[in-house]
Image: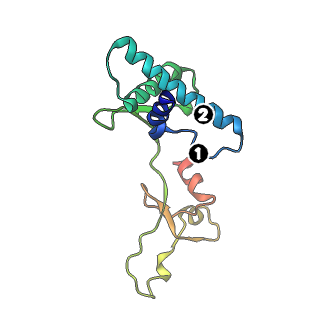
């Protein structure tokens, strides 16, 4: 029983099967994957006669898998790896565009200015449509735009 208890103690902080799964075999697969990662670390420590931090080992494993197999992934699904912390490499998804819809800034809190809080959509005005009022604007461009149709069409034409 000592070995099983030790394994459970070592896997306690890194339980990936803790998430609810509708299928029993997914939980079993995640458990076997987790145990195989622990066994790989134990085999590495016994062959190298050197202790390895469990979290650092897992991060290095993920990093090596990503670097080996990232070239087979389509270019629109790739993510870059950046050094965000001093000791561990963590993959971070780089977002190529910084145009996001945000709420317009309200200048004051009086009841009269609440009517002016909404602004006319730039695309609707430019295309001669019945001008819609919106509470959203582009974070980068600071241009008031309707979310549903105009936001995408404005940035595709720019």
Mark 2 sits on what residue? 30
Residue denoted by label 1: 19
Whether pointer 2 and pointer 1 mark residues with C-beta atoms closer than 8 Å, the reply is yes
Q: Residue drawn 54% across and 38% down?
A: 16
Mark 2 or 1, nearer chain start:
1
Q: Check disc 2 and report its element: helix, strand or loop.
A: helix
Residue 45 or residue 130, whichever sits in front: 45
Is 50 on the left or on the right of 132, as rendered?
Answer: left
Mark 1 crowd level (few <14, some 14–19, many ≥20, 10 Å Cα): few
The local crowd at label 2, few if under 14, some if 14 to 19, many if 20 or more residues have their Cα within 10 Å, is some
Can residue 95 be spotted in the picture?
Answer: yes
Image coordinates of residue 41 in percent, x first then y, are 43, 22
Residue 94 falls in which quadrant of the image?
top left
Residue 140 vs 131, above or below: the answer is: above
Locate residue 25, reporting x and y percent: 70, 34
Residue at 54 percent across and 62 percent down: it is 145
């Amino acid at each position: 029983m000592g070995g099983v208890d030790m394994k459970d103690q070592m896997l306690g902080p890194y339980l990936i099967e803790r998430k609810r799964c509708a299928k029993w075999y997914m939980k079993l697969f995640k458990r076997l994957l987790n145990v195989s990662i622990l066994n790989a670390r134990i085999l590495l420590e016994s062959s190298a006669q050197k202790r390895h931090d469990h979290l650092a080992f897992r991060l290095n494993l993920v990093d090596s898998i990503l670097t080996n197999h990232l070239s087979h992934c389509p270019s629109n699904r790739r993510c870059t790896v950046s050094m965000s912390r001093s000791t561990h490499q963590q993959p971070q998804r780089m977002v190529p565009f910084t145009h996001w819809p945000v709420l317009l800034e309200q200048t004051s809190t009086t009841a009269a200015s609440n009517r002016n809080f909404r602004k006319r959509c730039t695309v609707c005005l430019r295309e001669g449509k019945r001008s819609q009022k919106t509470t959203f604007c582009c974070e980068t461009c600071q241009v008031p735009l309707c979310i549903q149709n105009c936001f995408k069409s404005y940035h595709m034409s720019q």
